């Protein structure tokens, strides 16, 4: 009853994908998915605001790998074997068509994550994959020709192979059963979060966004471009969330207290901007500055920047002093925000950290420490930007692990 060919630990995206692929690769295998909670595919459910951001429309493996702060080099080769284009085709063969949004994110045409969940549950049922909920794995014991999986409540299973797909976890002790096998853990810390503005000088503009901002962390090389959103707690939007991923380790080290410099008009050389403003001043001397925004900036934001630059409402361009012009330049391309703390981006907690890639054969996803134990998904020290990249890493690693772990089954 408790003997299986493959046990998948984790009933999330990587776990289901790996189990289904293993079953498809070698029909007839006895496969069990063990999930510690009483919910399956919970992250799939909430992803993309409940629409499930399945992957990203980036069909070049090398380019795709550039979106991963951790794991980029290893993923380049893995994506050559199974990438975003393959994911689209995989779902298509299961009757699920994906669509691409203008920013490259890909969703099911139904705009419902339940479509993806139903697809996985249907495939699991068709392949007679057994599922056990509410079982937490506590230990793996290696016998001569099989592995014993010990769970809480004195439940045990034996198996020939194990796929670890438990996802990321902010608590290091969640990985204890894996470190007991000799695996090194890169301490898990948050990735993909928004910034809490300590001073809240812009709180009256909450909900306002600019499409082409540049966001930098002062005194570092960390910078990102893209849409920026002002919120009631601080700064959000793709530029900020990408920045949080690439700077995750640094920001953890400084305890999430740092200065952000925002250019509301994207990358801009200061001298070129000064010349542009001088030209405008010359050509529109009688125009009121505050009531005529430049650079397609929203009126309320332009007014805020002028206020911070101490430019009065009635001032015209020919009345603008050099000192005031310099202050305006500063707030246009280096508006400072004193950040203290972070806020998780929606419900999508992503970890930077996990099982050290040095302990895994990244061609087969098999552990170098324990034969016949494989890894897939965010349990590894792999994480991507927001936009479908974390799911893509899950599909790719699960697909390759399933392919490799079924090779020596008759």
Image (cartoon, helix red, strand yellow):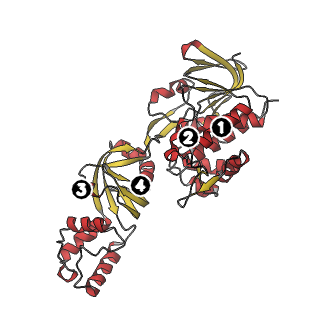
Mark 3, residue position: 201
Q: Is residue 71 visible?
A: no
Q: Are marks 1 and 2 in contact (CB under 8 Å)?
A: yes
Q: Are marks 1 and 3 in contact (CB under 8 Å)?
A: no
Farthest-out residue, front: 110
Q: CA distance from mark 3 to mark 2?
A: 36 Å
Residue at 62% from the left image edge and 43% from the top image edge: 115
Sort mark 1 into few (<14), some (14-19) or many (20+) by Cα contacts within 10 Å. Answer: many
Q: Quadrant of the N terminus?
A: top right
Q: Nearer the viewer, mark 1 or mark 3?
A: 1
Sequence-wise, the earlier of marks 1 and 3 is 1
Q: Secondary structure at mark 2?
A: helix
Mark 1, residue position: 120
Labelled disc at residue 92: none
Mark 2, residue position: 44
Mark 4, residue position: 237
Q: CA distance from mark 1 to mark 3?
A: 47 Å
Q: Are marks 4 and 3 in contact (CB under 8 Å)?
A: no
Sequence-wise, the earlier of marks 2 and 4 is 2
Sequence-wise, the earlier of marks 4 and 3 is 3
């Amino acid at each position: 009853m408790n003997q299986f060919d493959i046990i998948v630990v984790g009933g999330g995206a990587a776990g289901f994908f790996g189990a289904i692929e293993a079953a498809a690769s070698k029909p007839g295998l006895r496969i069990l998915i063990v999930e510690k909670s009483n919910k399956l595919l919970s992250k799939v459910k909430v992803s993309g605001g409940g629409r499930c951001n399945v992957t990203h429309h980036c069909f070049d493996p090398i380019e795709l790998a550039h979106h991963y702060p951790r794991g980029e080099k290893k993923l380049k080769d893995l994506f050559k074997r199974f990438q975003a284009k393959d994911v689209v085709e995989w779902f298509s063969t299961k009757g699920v068509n994906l669509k691409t949004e203008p920013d490259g994110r890909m969703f099911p045409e139904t705009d419902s994550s339940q479509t993806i969940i139903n697809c996985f549950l249907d495939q699991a049922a068709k392949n007679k994959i057994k599922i056990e909920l509410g079982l937490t794995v506590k230990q793996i014991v290696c016998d001569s020709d099989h592995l014993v999986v010990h769970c809480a409540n004195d439940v045990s299973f034996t198996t020939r192979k194990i796929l670890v797909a438990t996802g990321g976890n902010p608590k290091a002790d969640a990985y204890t059963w894996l470190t007991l096998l000799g695996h090194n853990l890169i301490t898990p810390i948050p990735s993909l979060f928004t910034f809490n503005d300590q001073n809240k000088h812009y709180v009256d503009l909450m909900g306002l966004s600019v499409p082409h901002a540049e966001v930098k962390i002062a005194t570092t090389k960390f910078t990102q471009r893209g849409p920026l959103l002002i919120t009631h707690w601080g700064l959000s939007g793709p530029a900020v969330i990408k920045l949080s991923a690439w700077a995750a380790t640094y920001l953890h080290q400084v305890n999430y207290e740092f200065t952000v410099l925002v250019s509301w008009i994207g990358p801009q050389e200061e001298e070129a901007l000064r010349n542009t403003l001088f030209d405008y001043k010359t050509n529109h001397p009688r125009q009121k500055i505050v009531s005529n925004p430049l650079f397609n900036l929203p009126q309320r934001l332009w007014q805020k920047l002028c206020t911070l630059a101490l430019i009065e409402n009635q001032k015209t361009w020919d009345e603008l002093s050099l000192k005031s012009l310099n202050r305006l330049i500063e707030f246009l391309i280096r508006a400072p925000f004193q950040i203290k703390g972070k806020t998780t981006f929606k419900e999508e907690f992503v970890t930077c950290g996990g099982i050290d890639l040095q302990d895994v054969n990244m061609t087969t996803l098999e552990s170098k420490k324990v034969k016949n134990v494989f890894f897939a998904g965010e349990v590894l020290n792999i994480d991507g930007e927001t936009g479908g990249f974390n799911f893509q890493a899950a599909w790719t690693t699960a697909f390759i692990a399933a392919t490799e772990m079924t090779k020596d089954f008759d």
